Amino acid sequence: MARNKEALVLLIDVGPSMHGVLPEIEKVCSLLMQKKLIYGKYDEVGIVLFGTDETENELSIEVGGYEHVSVLRKIKVVDGDAIEIIQNIKRGTSRGDFIDAIVVGIDMLIKKYGATNKGKHRICVITDARFPIKMPYEGTKGEQVDAISEQMKEHGIKLESIIFRESQVVQDEVTEENDRLLCQFAKRTTTRVVHVDSPTSLLGALKTRNVAPVTVYRGDLEISPNCKIKVWVYKKTSEEKFPTLKKFSDKAPPTDKFATHEVKVVFEYKSMVEPDKVVPPEQRVKGYRYGPQVVPMASHDWDSIRFRPEKGVKLLGFTDVSNVLRHYYMKDAYSFIPEPKNNRAIVAVSAIARAMKEMNKCAILRCVWRRGQGNVVIGVLTPNISSVDNIQPDSFYFNVLPFAEDLREFQFPSFDHLSAAWQPTTEQQEAADNFVLGLNLAPPGREEILPPEYTPNPVLERFYRFLDLKSKQPDANVQPLDPALKRITEPDPDLLSLHLPLLENLSKSFELRENPKKKRTSKLAWRPGNPTNQEIEAGPAGSQNATTSSNNLNIEGPSTSDASLTDVEIGDLNPVEDFEAMMARRDDSKWVQVAIKQMKRYVNDLLENSVDGDGSYDKAIDCLKALRKGCIIEQEPNEFNKFLKDLYEKWRATSLASFFGLLCSKGITLISKEEAADSDVTEETAKSFLVTIENESQ
């Protein structure tokens, strides 16, 4: 078996009490198969149903018994047929015995693999465990479970039990006994027992992807130069990304069975002076903008200035937990554990963790995970005291903390200084308190709603389902969001309806009134530069903004506080020089925004008042070039990109459409990330925008 290759046997209860939830089980098991086709295409899966009308398993033939247990699919490599099988499960009418099903699953794994690949075999049973299991021929049910556990331990078989039982189902002696027996497996084997009560939690209960834990650091936790503790560090959380999408081509001959259909992308760099000349790698160098200039930075320069800290984890000191605010936590969470089988490390970690817990302290660490790492991480270490004595050692959780450059401070006035008229009344506060308590997602006596460990990412889940559909129906449309996934993205309608009086009381306690926006309009119906007789709306500080019935560009004038900045304007004689002069001024930080807004208005007026080009096109092109260059230098790419898109949308279907052909010939397009880091536009998007203009202008 490959390192991460897994053998899984699914045991699904299809008895009468499970019929209502089987459609959801089919979905979640199908999703498991779909993910294995992406991430574990060599994994092997077997499917067993119990509670069936018929009996189809080898143990029943060999030794008798094990009735109403049917092997739907023997253990073999996952494929599309497995998805088809799991999506059409036949319902049964018999009461399922999960112990019999577990024994059949163990027998399948032992016969298939023998004593090899221990630890890579897993059995997952999905049942409501509402019916009693049969008494064994010898001994008690508990003794039978212990005997089965020994076999599982010997062959390295893990067990995962998912008990689906809706909240309105009343616990009785049978369900309590069955729950106790399933939990008893955990005493001798690697077992996980999960109780779920809704289709949404069922989606997250079955682990559809097996991610092997990988250490990011193995070495010393240096307390002092003379005191070091051996630790291993794992990632506790890590964002799950979309699977990597590759470029494929259909140009390969259909008869070529060995064609990979992969596309190789080659980039060429050409000179602006000689567009036909390709610039070789040895003549290219990266550069960084420093004011109006670009400072070249060669690879050997990078090697010289690159920070090469020493690998290791060092303790800087301790502080009160209250001093490290929750919103300082950055990126992923890590788990620090003592080196396995190192008793001295286990005792040392436990002693420090328990001391920190008692004194309500946390530790600040300096971390460099690997040799050659280009940065140093500063983070907070908090104790994690084991809840299971003598089984799992104490450990730590680690979170990365920000540096000063990483913080974003937004100052807001405190509510405490507001007048009494702006403070909530006693009745309003009580209504808000009751509303918050009523929508508690973890009510006493019930399972928590949307716990992270059982809540799947609805975006990823929808993608996997559509990928499977697309593989069967290439022309299929995206399906509506599944109701079980919809409960993750939207408030639970059942919870809202249950507490509707609280919501109504909250609404009545606060009077909500629309605050209409007041506008002052000028009586001027026409002014020079406004030949379309549109209404002129008086803006702040005496500026005037033209409003039309449709296709308006959103170009704002300077605010009242910027009135002193309007003394200098972009004129008709040398608009580019005026713009560059305004951009270069540093006596007020607002000059850049004022210059950009004035240039956008000037370009818009040029195009609006042009007649068959009449020289205005060339001037507009020069102004757009200057605006684009200025927005790149001052890191305002989105200002230019939005303006260019608005221009195109406004004038593309008018007599000014020929202007965009000229624009295309000059190569003026959106500012990409490669030109300005703050841009939201990729290089491909910028190129496609230019292609779109070129196609429409022909």
Image (cartoon, rainbow, N blue to C red):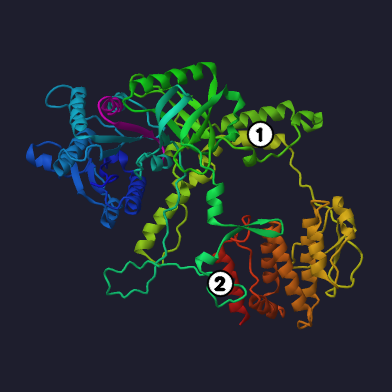
Please tell me which residue is depicted at 76% across the width and 47% down the height of the picture: 514
Q: Determine the residue positioned at 83% across, 66% down.
A: 578
Q: Which mark is on residue 270?
A: 2
Q: Residue 567 lies in what quarter of the image?
A: bottom right
- Horizontal placement of 667 versus 594: left or right? left
> How far apart are the two marked residues, 2 and 1, measured between alpha carbons?
68 Å
Q: Give the numbered dot on residue 458.
A: none
Image coordinates for residue 239, horizontal then vertical, percent: 47, 44
Q: Foreground: 346 or 41?
A: 346
Mark 2 Cα-neighbour bin, 10 Å: few <14, some 14–19, many ≥20: few
Question: For the point 47% across and 56% down, which residue is it?
Answer: 480
Three-letter code, disc 2:
Lys
Which element carries disc 1, helix, strand or loop? Answer: helix
Inspect the magenta stretch and tell me whether residue 204 lies in it: no
User: Mark 2 or 1 closer to N-term?
Assistant: 2
Q: Nearer the viewer, residue 33 or 115?
A: 115
On screen, residue 33 above or below 607: above
Mark identifier at residue 505: 1
Q: Which residues are magenta?
A: 179-198
Up-down relation of residue 42 to residue 273 (above or below): above
Tell me where residue 332 appears, x and y as whole percent. 49, 39
In the picture, residue 394 is in which quadrant? top left
